[in-house]
Amino acid sequence: MNPTTVRSSFPPSTFVWIALLAMLSLTSCKPEGFINKVKYRGETFLNTCETFTADINKVISANSNASKLAVSEYDNTDFNYFYLEPGQFEIKGDTLYFRLASDLEYAQYLDKGIAVHVNASYKAVSQLASLESDAAGDIGTLKVDREYYIANRKPFFVYKFPLAGKDLAGKQIMLSFAVAKYKASGDLKSFLCETEATPIGTAMPSCCTAARWEPVGLQSVVGAPKLDVKAESFRYAGFTGTIDVMFMENSAKLSDDSSFSTMLITSFVKKYADLGYKITRLDLTGWASPGGTVKLNENLSQARADALKQGLTALNGNIEGLEINAKGMGEDWDRVKLLTEISSLTREQKDQVYAIADDATLALDQKEAKLRKVAFWDTLVEEVLVKARHTFCVMDFKYEGSQATIDRFAERLPVASQALEQVASTVISAKPYTKGADIQAGLASLNDLLTKKASPNLYAMRADYYIAQGNISGAVADLERAAQFRDAQAGNYQAAAQGYKITFADSYSFEEKQALYNQLSQLTRERPNDREVFFQRAIIMDKLGLLDAALGEYDKLMDGSTPTAAQLNNRAVARLKGNMVTMAKADFLAAAAADPKLAEAEYNLAVVCAYQGLSRETETHLDKAIALDNKYKGMILNNPVFSVMSGLPRFDKYRE
């Protein structure tokens, strides 16, 4: 049979048009920026640049808080594989590993010929760029295609970027994403939907990886000399005592009462000598009452002063160097006015006495004559004038004992008073701060003492009280004052002040930290063989955010030498802030082993273990830290790194 030929009723040109229409129909169904259609979890996704960009923006937004520390939400005590929680980073070996919070659903986009390129770069924030040796650069590109994602998605997808020796510690990590189309041959065809490089976490002055650890309170150990602050006791350098010796009318003779006064003076001179105070000067001022002529009273007042001086000749002979001065001053109108005020006279009578005494137009004899004419003259004599016939004795005493002294006691007190006896017996003590001491009382005493006797030891002592109070700036200022005395401990005071500045630099502004860094850099140039200064600068580099520089300094200083526990601990702090979690933990463990009494290392180990979700290890290290220093008990609750663990029953003991 001959084959049957079927002929179409349409001309050939019609088929061409049908094919073109079909192609146009297919094209018109694809939205703008079309990537692909993928079935994922029972749902078909039409992927476009718009959906891709929206998903990437969600990822960036979920990872934009640099100050939030991503702590393990689970208890990983019984797991031993390498794990990271969403939002955690680690530099291990020469590779950067990290997980993103709310990561992109890669399986929704990946298909044959389609991959997502993740481009990573880094840079220092502007405040630190001038201090960084490697302020910015590219890390590399991670090609995530279907095969790569399937091979690396379990137990969870982790980004892995080889670093090739780049220093990322402290740097701001930047990510950008793009969809890549590949030919069947495997060659790159084109890029779609490229996003801008965006920081993972908000750039902050303390910078990037370190910022998340700031609220945790990682503990550095600053080497500073232990100051030899000693208790001190002081006596007053001297004081002044007074006594009033009374005389009969128109008499310069020592009466029985006057003789008793001289015996009283002699006895108290001896009593105060037994307490270490020697009398050095006696000023005897004789006075008379207005009751005779001015000339008569001038002579009488001098005679009264001389009489008392004669009565104290025994003192003059027994006390070497004693100076006794006797001088008559005439009529004592000031005493008259004072005694008038406390007399039984009426207000009108008192004002009458004041008017006469203060009348500048009257001579003294005229005042006396006018005073004699007042109606209340007898009362005035009995209550006022009789007590204006006296010699006022002022005695200066000087301490000659073995104790240190402060300024003289300023107030004049009666020589036979209990108040003056108390002054002579007073020993003013200053004791160094001890745990549990009354800080406010200690500071009040030292504040008063330092107004009278400034010394380097007392300033250093007050600095200890300030530290206990939390007043770091006050402590530093006092230690710097102590150093200005330039005694044998001046260098130690200055070193201690520097140490406190470094220890508490976390509370400083960025500018203050940078100023301290500049000071230490100057010291390294002046003292190139002083390794401690270099270690201190490394700590400030860490606190400033210059983590790669800090780690470089630590490695250089510790190369070829046996590091101390403090040095290992401090390098570990910088490593932890720089995302070198495994290396940091190894350093902390080595520090604790080198010095089992280093509470800082135990606390820092608790921080690392809590970050990793290792509850039993966290508890062990917290217990050790608290046993060494109870202050760490107060650093657990409200601490973000312990936020998950603190809810476990075994952590209830830290609430007590």
Image (tube, grey):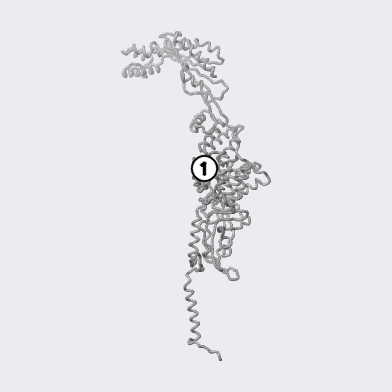
Q: Residue furthest right?
A: 560
Q: Residue furthest bottom?
A: 1
Q: Nearer the viewer, residue 362 or 580?
A: 580
Q: Is residue 514 visible?
A: no
Describe residue 346's horizontal placement relative to residue 228 as left or right: left
Disc 1 secondary structure class:
helix
* Rendered view: 298 above or below 123: above
Q: Which residue is mark 1?
A: 635
- On the image, the x and y values in percent for residue 89 come to 56, 53
Q: Nearer the viewer, residue 593 or 521?
A: 593
- On the image, the x and y values in percent for residue 195 come to 52, 62
- On the image, the x and y values in percent for residue 299 come to 44, 11
* Rendered view: 345 above or below 536: above
| Residue type for callout 1 | Met
Q: Going 48% across and 62% down the picture, which residue do you hit? A: 54
Which quadrant holds the N terminus?
Answer: bottom right
Q: Nearer the viewer, residue 237 or 210?
A: 210
How crowded pointer 1 is (Cα within 10 Å; few <14, some 14-19, many 20+) is rated as some
